[in-house]
Image: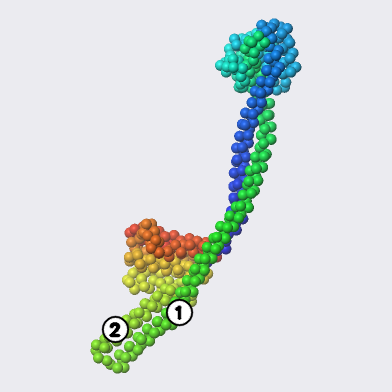
Amino acid sequence: MIQKPASIARPVLVFALSGLVAAALVAVAGAYAFRSLGTDEALKDARRLTDVTGHGIVEPALTTDVVRGRPPAIARLDRIVRRRVLSPDVVRIKVWNAEGKILYSDEPLLIGRRFPLGGDELAALRGRSTAAEVPDLSRPENAYERGQGDLTSVYLGLRAQDGTPVLFEEYLRSSAIAGNSRSLVRRFAPIGIAALLVLAALQIPLAWRMASRIRNAQRDREQLLQRTLDASDKERRSIAAGLHDGVVQELAGHSYQMTAAIEQHQPEPVLRQVLAEGAAGTRNAIRQLRSLLIEIYPPALRDHGLAAALPDLTAPLTARGMDVTVDVQPGLSLPSETEQLVFRSAQEALRNTAAHAGAGHVSVSVSQTTGMVTLLVADDGRGFDEQQLAERRTEGHLGLSIIRDLAESAGGNLRVNSQPGDGTRLELELPTR
C-alpha cells in the first residue's frame, strides 16, 4: 500500500521561513558590524578634520608671541578659533606645550594653567601624529567640559613658528561621531539587507525544485516497490497454480493407483510393502507441497482473512513440535493491501524463526486500534545481534529489509528487537486508512 506523496509546500515554506530568520540574524549582525565600521570611519574623519584644522588654521597662527603668552597674540588666535574652528560639534579647543601648560583655550580660565600630559599626548606632540580618545571628565583639566555630554578628544602634534612643539586638542561631541556612524549604516545597510532578501528569494525556487525531485524519486521508489510486490504476487499465483494443477494432481493420481493396486491385486508381501511405502511417501510429498502452496499463495487470506491464513503459516512450526499461539482480534477489518503486508511480515518472521531461532515457543498476534493495525511476532529462541543481522544481509537475506521498506512506504514502521539468548520480537505498525 503506497501512500500519496506529501505536499512539498510545507517543507519549502519551512525552508523559506528559516532562510528569512537566518537573513534577519545576518542583517542584525551586519548592522552592528556596519555601525562599528561606521564609528571607526567617523573617528578617522574626526582625526582628518582635526589634522586639517590644526595644520591649516591653527598652526599658521601659532606665533612666538602665543608661545610666550602675549595677550594680543592670544586674542588674535582666539578670534581665528571662534570664527573658523568652533561649531556646535566642536565644543573646546586647547593648545599645550610640552611642559603641560595650556598656551591657549577658548575657555580663558584655562590659559596659563598646568596639568600633566599623558604618554599618548606626549607621543603625539613629539611625533606630530593624530590620536583620539574618550576624555576622563573627572580630571582637573576637563572641569570646564563637564555638562557638555559625551565627548571625544582628538589631539594633534603641531609646531609653532619658532619650532616649539605644541599639542593641539579638539573636543568633539560624541553624538556627531555617532551621527556619522548612523549615516554610514543607513547608507550601506539597506544594500546588504536587500542582497540577503534577494538571495533568500532566489533559494526558494531552488528549494522547490530540489524538494520536487526528492518527492518524485520517493514516488518512483515506492512505485517500484509496489510493482515488485505485484509481480511477486503474480509469480506466486502462477507457481501455485502450476504446482496444484500439475505436480500435486499427478502425485495424487499415483498415490491412488498404488493404493488401488494393493487392494485389488493382493501382491506378494515384499511388493505390497514397497507399494504401501510409496503411497505413504507420495501422500507425504503432497502434504508438503500443499503446505508450500499455502506459503506461496495463501487462498485462506484471500477468502477468509488473517484469522484463517495465519494458522496455516504456523502449521509447519507446530509439525516440528514448536509451541505456537495465534491471536487475531475478532472482527478485524483491513484494506487488502494492508492485510497482505501484515501476512507477508508474519510469514517472513516465522520463516526466520524456523530457520535460525531454535525456539520452543512463538506467539503471533494482530490487533487493531483506531486507524492503526499492529502485528507482533515473538519467540524465545537464541536471538541475534547487529553483526549477525549484517552477515545475513550480505548473504542475500533481505526479507526484513524489503518488508521495512514496504512498511515505511505505507506510512508505517517495522521494529525488530533481539539480543543473543533473549529471543526476537518483531513489531509492525501500519495505518489502516
* Vertical order, 345 against 172 (above or below): below
Q: Can I make out residue 216 in this image?
A: yes
- Secondary structure under badge 1? helix
Q: How far apart in space, not on screen, are marks 1 and 2 (Cα)?
A: 28 Å
Q: Quadrant of residue 53?
A: top right
Place of residue 378 in the rendered image (x, y in percent of width and height, measured from the top left): 39, 63
Q: Residue furthest left?
A: 269
Query: Which residue position holds label 2?
Result: 277
- Circle count: 2
Place of residue 347 in the rendered image (x, y in percent of width and height, measured from the top left): 42, 69
Q: Which mark is residue 142?
A: none
Q: The C terminus lies in which quarter of the figure?
A: bottom right
Residue name at image x 58 percent, y 12 percent: 116
Q: Nearer the viewer, residue 428 or 366?
A: 428
Residue name at image x 47 percent, y 76 percent: 237
- Secondary structure under badge 2? helix
Q: Which mark is residue 241?
A: 1
350 on left or right of 137:
left
The kind of residue on which mark 2 rests is Glu
Q: Can I make out residue 10 in this image?
A: no
